[in-house]
Image: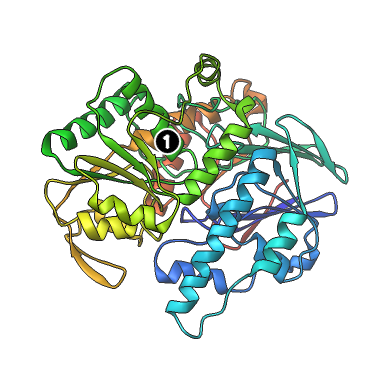
Amino acid sequence: MKIKFMGGTGRVTGSCFLLEAEGKKILIDCGLFQGDAASRGKNHEAFAFDPKQIDVLIATHSHIDHIGRIPKLYRDGFNGKVYSTNPVKDLAGIFLEDTLKLLKGEVKRKPGHELIWDETDLNKALNSWEGFDYHQMFNIGNIKIEFLDAGHILGSAFIKVSAEGKIVVFSGDLGNPPVPIIEDTESVTKADYVIMESTYGDRFHESTESREAELKQSLDNIYDRGGVLLIPAFAMERTQELLYEINHLVEAHKIENTSVFLDSPLAIKATQIYYKYRNYFDEPARDIIKSGDDIFDFRGLTITKTGEESRKILSAKKPKVIIAGSGMSTGGRILGHEVNYLEDPNNMILFIGFQVKGTLGRKIKDGEKLVKIMGQEVEVKAEVREISGYSAHADQPKLLHWLKGMCDIEAEKPKRVFLIHGEPEVEQVLAEKIRTDLSLNVEVPEENEEIILI
């Protein structure tokens, strides 16, 4: 058995891992590289393996840094199945369609660049995609595969692979419980090898109570200033959590009446898929729905589907809140709002998700005062805030807690842990913490490194 690390190493995007066991070649995720130009350029490179030889691909969840190059696999000769949970299968379609629009826009802006995949490749992928429920065991030859709830976004899973007498666990992205709507991250009690994300391996998130209090404070501040609150939000999970929590604040009369605009066609589509999979919700969310309350709708919310409706937000009366994609300000409708509102000190931009190095969101979050948006230089005078508690990624204590669950029996502790999906300095911090607290053998693999699992 061996594993090759071909993405998500020393970075938080481009996740892609090749597991070879029992005569089979299984790809775990195949995501887009995101961030600066050099990172995005890697999407155009040839795969470090022959896609024709891959037997099957397993997708942990629907974020584009985990599935964005799957159609490219088909373009380059892959002809196998894609397996994921059922919600991920449905969500993948809308996210990949949206990604194709962004890729086409990039090609238009950069003459000479070619699409890395197109509609034909996308259709091949979606037509070959099969969904499973959590704990629905299935086989690939002699290899047993099981999806367990990662608690990250709707349908997200970590993967338990049993082959050649060994158990290998791929974490995918682990969640940040307790969060609204979805169930908490499941535990696993035994693994020989663990491939684990480390996105926030050096961070401690705010508590759930602090998170809601900070959101309320931001809403109150914008109301008092008569300003505009911009929230660049990922279409999955963060948008739905925001709607859920603002709904709670409105219903409980904890905030003043303020206009809220959901200006993200992709988030609107994703929210409809949430309604379809209510059986995946946690008990509090199901109870609220049974009471007759719509957890994603409230007084003052306006959903803007068309471009014309989006443009009308500019003339809407202040104070107002605009939730729009993309979550790292790399595209989407948030860009136009940032041009319109970032130069006013009465306004605020609130980041609620991880900002990859090189993205516009990261530049603003890190304090750059002059940024370029859609070819236009914009001075950042608006207040910049961040609530990391809204992150869908586990922080250091939760990563350690999940891993500790595999260490209860000394003789069955993982032989090796491999840290991926994190910036280099963060991976090293978490690696040292794991060595100190759990006495495990931890490694930080390099891109294209191949390791034999004995």
Disc 1 secondary structure class: helix
Dot 1 amino acid type? Lys
Indicate whether 378 appears above or below 309: below
At horizontal 17% and vertical 46% (from top left) the residue drawn is: 347
Foreground pick, 249 / 152: 249
Q: Position of residue 20 (x, y in %)?
A: 76, 53
Q: Residue furthest bottom?
A: 112
What residue is shown with label 1?
433
In front: 432, or 304?
A: 304
Q: Is residue 315 left or right of residue 302?
A: left
The image shows residue 83, relative to residue 339, as above or below, that is: above
- Picture residue at 88% right of the left edge, 46% below the top: 141
Residue 143 x, y percent position in the rendering: 82, 42
The extreme right residue here reads 141
The answer to whether residue 205 is seen in the rendering is yes
Graded by Cα atoms within 10 Å as few (under 14), some (14 to 19) or many (20 or more), the crowding at tag 1 reads some
The image shows residue 17 at horizontal and vertical percentages of 64, 54
Residue 406 seen in render? no
Q: How many marks?
A: 1
**Image coordinates for residue 279, horizontal then vertical, percent:** 64, 25
Q: Residue at x 35, y 62 (%)?
A: 358
